[in-house]
Image (cartoon, rainbow, N blue to C red):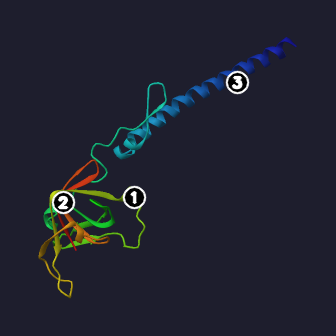
Amino acid sequence: MKLKKAMILFCTVCILNTMITGCGSGSESAAKTEETQAEKASPEELNDAPLKGIDGSAEEPQENTAGKWQALEPDVASAVNADFLGKVQKMEEDSFFIVERKVKVLDDGSIIYSSPSSDTDIPDSQLIHVVFEEDTRFYLKETDENEEGDGYEESGFQDLKEHMFVEMKGSFKNDEFYATEIRFF
């Protein structure tokens, strides 16, 4: 009888040790897996993930100082003679909102433009606020009946309408585009 109790006690101790050892290495394995995932993650994924503080609570991510919107790359800006392109989506009394108009310069020097359809419902979070000063210059593209032409005539904000394309010179500050020159058609 004592032998039977001793074997049961011995087996119980062995099982408990196995469980403790298994749980301990599981935690270590989980920590190693997190480190491996962090090493493989791209910088963008790491920037979007909430940071964990010393106490394990999640901290808010730091503000992106570069901003959501960026001016065109210098080579593209030179090719289109503008710092940013867009399509007017919403008008206000003294400013307007655009959706970005993508541009790509091909190897042969030709330029491809793309923008959402006028019928597309664009969320406000995807619109770019364009701000201008009193000295901002506005130009309306001169076109003939075939919609061809490359000259611009001086114009004003009152001539700008929704769904017109804009080519702008200026810069971004806090994800707002501050225009010094606006050409539209």
Q: Helix, strand, or loop for circle 1?
A: helix
Out of 101 and 9, give the one closest to the viewer: 101
Out of 146 and 162, give the one closest to the viewer: 162
Residue occupied by mark 2: 83
User: Is 179 left, or right, of 50 in this rendering?
Assistant: left
**Mark earlier in primary sequence (3, 1):** 3
User: Is 18 left, or right, of 101 in this rendering?
Assistant: right
Distance between the alpha carbons at the discs numbered 3 and 1: 60 Å
Residue occupied by mark 1: 124
Looking at the image, is 117 positioned above or below residue 84? below
Distance between the alpha carbons at the discs numbered 2 and 1: 22 Å
| Relative image position of residue 155 (x, y in whole percent) | 16, 70
Q: In this view of the protein, can residue 107 be seen by the observer?
A: yes
Instruction: Count neighbours of disc 2 (C-alpha within 10 A) and say few if under 14, some if 14 to 19, many if 20 or more.
Output: many
Out of 111 and 138, give the one closest to the viewer: 138
Classify the position of the N terminus by image quarter. top right
Q: Which residue lies furthest to the right in this view?
A: 1
* Amino acid at the residue labelled 1: Asp
Q: Helix, strand, or loop for circle 2?
A: loop
Looking at the image, is 13 positioned above or below residue 106? above
Q: In this view of the protein, can residue 70 be seen by the observer?
A: no
Distance between the alpha carbons at the discs numbered 3 and 2: 70 Å
Q: Quadrant of residue 142?
A: bottom left
Residue occupied by mark 3: 15
Q: Are marks 3 and 1 in contact (CB under 8 Å)?
A: no
* Amino acid at the residue labelled 3: Ile
* Amino acid at the residue labelled 2: Asp
